[in-house]
Amino acid sequence: MGGKRKGTGYAGNVFESPSPILGQPWQVPALADLPPIPPGVGFGCYYQPNASVGVPLVPSYRPCDPGYFCPYVVDQVMLLCPPSPECFMNRLAGGSPCLPQGRFEPALCPAGFYCPTPSTIHPCPEGHYCVTGTTQPTPCQFMSSCPTGTITETHFGTLLIVLLADVLLCIVFYCQSVYERRRDGASWIDAATPTFLQGRGRRRRPKTTRKDAECSRSSRFGRLNARTAAADKYSGTRPTQVRAATATIAAGADAARATTSTFEEVSVLVQAFRDGFNGDERLRMHFAFDNLTLALPTGKVVLGGVTGGIRAGHMTAIMGGSGAGKTTFMNVLMGKVQRTGGALRINDEVDEIHNYRNLIGFVPQDDTMLRVLTVREAVLHSARMRLPSSWPASKVAAHVDNLLRALNLSSVAHTRIGDEVTRGISGGQRKRVNIALELVAAPLALFLDEPTSGLDATASLDVVDILQAVSKLGVTVVSIIHQPRIEIFERFDDVLLLAPGGRTAYFGPIARAKDYFTSLGFRFDSEANPADVLMDIVSGRGQRADPDREVPVDLASQWVSSGSTVHVDLSTTTTTESGGGPTNKAMRSVAARRGATWLQQAFHCHNRSLLKQSRELTSLQLELFCAFLAGFLMGNAVTGNVESFYGLTLEPYALISLQPDGWLIAMYGMLAGMSVALSAAPSGVNVFGEDLPVYWRETASGQSPSAYYVGTSISVLWRIVLSAAHFTAIYYVLARPTFAVGLQYLMILLNVYCVYGISACISMITSRGNMALVSVVTTSVMAFNCGFLITLNRARDAGFEWAFDLGPNRWMAEAQFGLTLNTYEGVYNLASEASKYGYDLDAFANDMLMMVALGIAYRVVAYVFMVTAHRDKQK
């Protein structure tokens, strides 16, 4: 009702002389100024003024009820007069409310006016709004546009707050970006220039010092001279053996590369290892296993009775052809896969490795880590989660910095790791970061799955040099390697060669492997890489030294019949000079003290997730834009309505009602829910779905799944708050609801909260490529089932109302329907309109509680999915 009302097409209607105009006083003639009605020729109706027509609405005189404008019903009975054709069509099909069709016909106080009494009418004052049937104007909210004659307010306050929040976020993220670029060594000009102006993907290379550029093999973590002194100090129990082993390596090293490092660097790391073991320098982890076997349910044997031992302070290589069972052996040894036969002894005690998860490091073949973090951030997070909680933050940070320096990663410490799209560190550096994530926890044993895969020869040798230095500090190192160059192969102490079927072809010192296979009649060319020759032999392509001599075809059977094996004398290797060896009980005690507390883990996971989100600004911007666009489109669909609702008037005024349009409110509830689903679901699946491999790796190392889940879930609440605010801000401006913006925001907020929970469930059980689509479809279908097209009454009668109750939009639609209609309480028959859909008009509090409960329930289900799906990857 934005101006003068249209005429009814006939003369004599005093209510149209003049018609009401919004924002202006409306004066109708006084009763005393009206001509009298001739007796016996009508009842004051305007369409047929000379006919004796008119239907009494009540049997006898009664005043009009509040909310009606009846200036001439003083002592006369209220009448229903014949309507004009235009009024008839409005009442039949819906349209603008009709002016009274007769002198004694009641009419609702028109929108934009308020009627304190049935005989008085005033324009709605500035700063207020007045819907149909208003007796007292309703104050507008802060920062709303409400000129005189406002029907529903136009609220800009929330939109301005959201825009201000966006500006502040941009400033914060920009300052963070400048800080990080300056930290990387960029000039102020480069740091202050936005990335999109520098060119896509352009990143400044970190400065490289002369020391960093040396990149020599012996300059790594334990350069030879420093390694000797450090190992003596750390072990204390085997100085002669360690010194001898180190001297052997030094003798074979390239003199041109044999540079020395400062003793302080290595000694600090040694001290960190000692502190990590509660000062117990005797702790070592030796493995002895007998007939380790794994048979599939089909009966196929994939690991056929491996027997031998792995010694602490040694590097053991696992080699074999494709499908020979290398990864299977490692998984069985680590307890990731339950073996079907055989026994395992740790330090001469029957035990299982999974009892010491906090003391074990596993480096997967893929560089599984959060690529948006910097090198130091990734390693520091691992240290905080896995080192003893008693360590102060300064000690943890110093340990991380020393480790990065030892692994020659200091020059890229503040560089993002990067991926295939975003430029970051090199492949060799990324592999060293992969190792650092485990080494920072000061493990007793380190298992690696092809740590040199995808690297060039130089980078591969760098990695193996690091592992060799680590092993000389007493750490048990077991690694799967594939076709190593000779320099890499000779860095290892022992090798397990697996023949097809997971059977042992050789298990022993590398130095004796050539002699063993030579004794079987195989030939080793002097210029050939022994590792390549061994791979040819176990693959059945070995060359015979004597063409006339037969060589064994079944190398596994030959190995068993030879009686050869690796013998680990645990009675001596676990005994110190002071008497007595470390018991597994002592190791379990150390393992129990490892790792941050649950609250600390949740806190660190929360902060890491926040940091990750701050690095993925494009994703955040897209989510907020989609939420704003969804609110804009939804608001535009509603903004054409002058007023949000017309209903059936209460008795005795039902006959003057317009066609009720409660279906519009119900439909808007459905569309609003679907808009929320479309804008929020794609972002919801990314909270966990993109990082599940990282979660699997961290859980396998002993970190708390619940702490990770709770911390990460809390970290996205601010994102949910912002997304809901962007949707609500523009939607509220355009749709102009008749209830407080805070209530509208609360409904959208809880709906987005629930959609995120549903998306989390889907991301746990759906493939990465399909989870966004499945999430959008699922949440949209749930939003559709809100009681509009298929009413709650029909669903209840059919017995599947529970399916509707599981969707958040069923509750939001009911709440929005109730808030909208309750504005007209005492004016329209609200109960009859609500009964069409099965809604409860007074259930707002219950609806909000149900949405909170659903959001929590979705997250509980998602957590169950997370910890139960892919169990093999969490061991």
Image: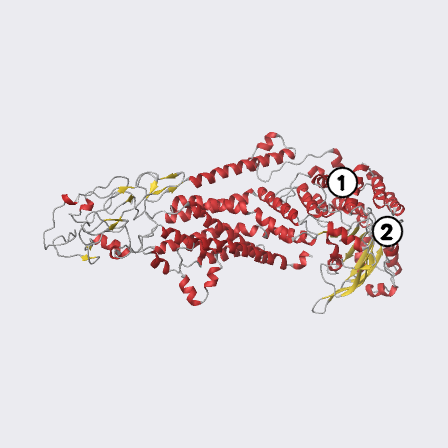
Q: Are marks 1 and 2 in contact (CB under 8 Å)?
A: no
- Horizontally, residue 748 falls left or right of residue 830, namely right
Q: Residue 839, image x and y in percent? A: 40, 58
CA gap, disc 1 to disc 2?
36 Å
User: Which residue, as the protein is rendered here, is positioned at the far top?
Assistant: 188
Give the mark, 1 or 2, whose residue is nearer the N terminus. Answer: 1
Q: Is residue 798 visible?
A: yes
In what quadrant of the picture does the N terminus appear? top left
Q: Is residue 770 visible?
A: no
Q: Which residue is mark 1?
A: 406
Q: Which residue is mark 2?
A: 526
Q: Residue 232, image x and y in percent? A: 86, 43
Q: Which secondary structure, mark 2?
A: loop
Observer-nearest of 714 and 554: 714
In what quadrant of the picture does the C terminus appear? bottom right
Observer-nearest of 717 and 38: 38
Label 2 Cα crowd, 10 Å radius (few <14 / some 14-19 / many 20+):
few
- Judging from the image, the colouring scheme is secondary structure
User: The residue under label 2 is which amino acid type?
Assistant: Ser
Q: Is residue 643 above or below residue 520?
A: above
Q: Which secondary structure, mark 1?
A: helix
Observer-nearest of 494 and 378: 378
Residue at the image position 72 percent from the left and 69 percent from the top: 299
Q: Residue 825, image x and y in percent? A: 34, 52
Q: Is residue 331 above or below residue 273?
A: below
User: The residue under label 1 is which amino acid type?
Assistant: Ala
Label 1 Cα crowd, 10 Å radius (few <14 / some 14-19 / many 20+):
many
User: Which residue, as the protein is rendered here, is positioned at the far left?
Assistant: 39
Q: How many marks?
A: 2
Residue 828: assigned label: none
Camera-near label (1 vs 2) is 1
Q: Residue 198, image x and y in percent? A: 57, 35
